[in-house]
Amino acid sequence: MPIIGSFGAGSGRGYGLTGVKPALIKATGGTISQDGDYRIHTFTGSGTFEVQEISPLSPGNVDYLVVAGGGSSGQDQGGAGGAGGYRESYNPCTSGCYSASPLATPTSLPVSVQSYPVTVGAGGAGAPYPGPIVNGSDSVFSTITSTGGGAGATVQGPATGNTGGSGGGGSERNAGTPNPGASGNTPPTSPPQGNPGGAGVNGSYNGGGGGAGEAGNTDGGGAGGDGVASSITGSPVFRAGGGGSGSTPNLPTGLPGGDGGGGHGTSPLNPVNSPTTNGAANTGGGAGSSTGYGGIGQGGNSGGSGVVIIRYKFK
């Protein structure tokens, strides 16, 4: 029975004599990990996703999470930085069952045998007072671009901060019309990549930075907008939280950043118990804001760098 024998000595899966199932997609680049039958490439810095082979049995698609760098915070009485833009896809046929963020599109990306440059955006750099405000840098994979987070405002202007993936918070205003936070989801994507920053109003807190999951909060409670969580790497992680605002001297602490790496704001009279922090690295978190009176002139802080993650079925 030579025909039965030749297949019987091989693989019951029908892949030949060795019993080894070939990879559906073979690729290199980034830090590679595995979650069951799925492979994950995590880029914490720019690099190349190199697709070397695609099996005829593979649909040739990958899912992605692309987060841009967070924005810097404004100096002195300035607003907090907005989170970097957040874009994600999730299709269980491509990358299995896990909890994606509410922002995930069901449309995976097709890939072919070629090199795909990956750009991981830096966070916007904080500057001493007086100085510029700086948006985060874009992150890019294939046709997907996430926009850097908008920088928080300064009292020198622009009072509304900068637009971006999520918008920066408005600077404090002692009286009159509030200084609104800047717009998020700029340029617009669907689902939206971020939210606006919060407004700075009368003499207490500046505006919090916008996050991927919600807008930055406003005067009197200027916490950063929360980010969103995804288990694309196999466990849930929050990313793209907005920065928290600083407080005026009559208040004891600044406000926390949003879940997902947003930096904490500070009080100029209590910097030890309420330290200002940068956005967390590789989360796209916006910078927490410092604020100062009486010539303190505290500087701005830096947003967190972004990240690019690619996931697909490989066996």
Image (tube, rainbow, N blue to C red):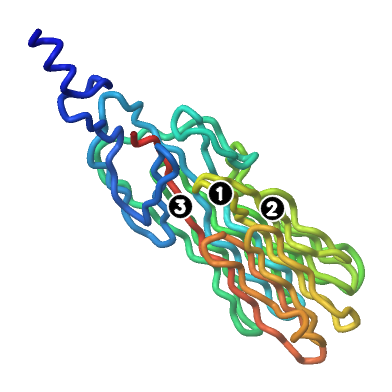
Mark 2 or mark 1, whichever is nearer to me:
1
Residue at the image point whose x is 60% and y is 55% from the top: 239
Residue 183 tag number: 2
Residue at the image point whose x is 39% and y is 43% from the top: 39
Q: Position of residue 86 (x, y in %)?
A: 57, 49
* 3D distance between C-alphas at marks 2 and 1: 31 Å
Q: Quick one: label 2 or label 1, which is nearer the N terminus?
A: 2
For the residues labelled 2 and 1, say whether their Cβ atoms are less than 8 Å apart.
Answer: no
Q: On screen, 173 above or below 51?
A: below
Q: On screen, 314 above or below 162?
A: above
Q: Position of residue 184 (x, y in %)?
A: 66, 51
Identify the residue position indicated by label 1 in the image. Answer: 235
* Secondary element type, mark 2: loop
Residue lying furthest front: 1
Q: Quick one: label 1 or label 3, which is nearer the N terminus?
A: 1
Identify the residue position indicated by label 3 in the image. Answer: 308
Residue at the image point whose x is 81% and y is 64% from the top: 222
